Amino acid sequence: MNQEMILIIVPITYLIGSIPVGLIIGKLKSGIDIRKHGSQSTGATNALRILGTKSAILVLILDFLKGAIPIFYIMRIDEINSNYAPLIAISGIAIIIGHNWPIFAGFKGGKGVASAVGIASVLNPLSALAAILTFLPILLTTRYVSLGSILGAIVAMIILVIQSISIINDYNYIYALVVGPLLVIKHHENIHRLLNGNERKFGEKE
């Protein structure tokens, strides 16, 4: 794979990640910038709080697909798989960076969970399933979306690393070792509130 192709794919995946789905839906539905309300995130959880259930589901699905679809197609380019497999992981990282720091929205976006699960579902469906099966029981028992998201992301990234290092020419561990910490860092305010006992629970309004 030539260098020009690499310089094309990585910026494109960043730009795809930068599409601020939650911000767009908030503007179209209610004429508001959801980053000025609730947790100030463009993600589905804040969309649920500010825009309602239908909008939140739409944000969740589109953010998931924003991660899954580009990686799905990149993985089907034979030249990448044969000669530059690390580009798959790098493209996934670019999508998450774009989602979290979108050029189209003043570098103020979401926390990357839905897009990260979308990417993981293509890289290794088992890791995405593990994330969901970790997230749901925690959400149902504690009603803390952030706690479920953090622990689900950690479980998924551990599985990605373990699987990746056991397979020749598999570089998913690069994605996991970068994106895992990024997801935790983006939840630093949630972690602080969890420790202080004042984190919002699922279903609570602004």
Image (cartoon, rainbow, N blue to C red):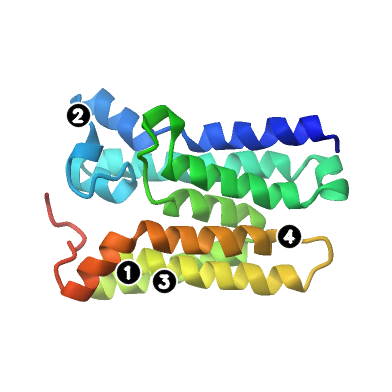
Q: CA distance from mark 1 to mark 3?
A: 6 Å
Please provide percent x and percent y for residue 31.
Answer: 20, 24
Q: CA distance from mark 1 to mark 4?
A: 28 Å
Please provide percent x and percent y for residue 73.
Answer: 69, 39
Classed neighbour count for the residue bearing mark 3: other residues with Cα under 10 Å, few (<14), some (14–19), many (≥20): some
**Picture residue at 17% right of the left edge, 57% below the top:** 203
Q: Say what amino acid the circle numbered 1 marks.
A: Leu
Q: Nearer the viewer, mark 1 or mark 4?
A: 4
| Secondary structure of residue under mark 2 | loop
Classed neighbour count for the residue bearing mark 1: other residues with Cα under 10 Å, few (<14), some (14–19), many (≥20): some
Q: Is residue 160 left or right of residue 15?
A: right
* In the rendered image, the vertical position of residue 93 relative to residue 133, given as above or below: above
Q: Earlier in the sequence, mark 1 or mark 4?
A: 1
Q: Which residue is mark 1?
A: 147
Q: Which residue is mark 3?
A: 151
Q: Which residue is mark 4?
A: 171
The residue closer to the viewer here, 41 or 133, is 41
**In the rendered image, is residue 23 in sight?**
yes
Q: Are marks 1 and 2 in contact (CB under 8 Å)?
A: no
Q: Earlier in the sequence, mark 2 or mark 4?
A: 2
Q: Say what amino acid the circle numbered 3 marks.
A: Leu
Please provide percent x and percent y for residue 142.
Answer: 24, 74
Q: Are marks 1 and 3 in contact (CB under 8 Å)?
A: yes
Q: Say what amino acid the circle numbered 4 marks.
A: Tyr
Classed neighbour count for the residue bearing mark 4: other residues with Cα under 10 Å, few (<14), some (14–19), many (≥20): many
* In the rendered image, the vertical position of residue 159 relative to residue 123, given as above or below: below
Q: Say what amino acid the circle numbered 2 marks.
A: Ile
**Quadrant placement of the N terminus:** top right
Q: Nearer the viewer, mark 4 or mark 3?
A: 4
Please provide percent x and percent y for residue 110.
Answer: 37, 46
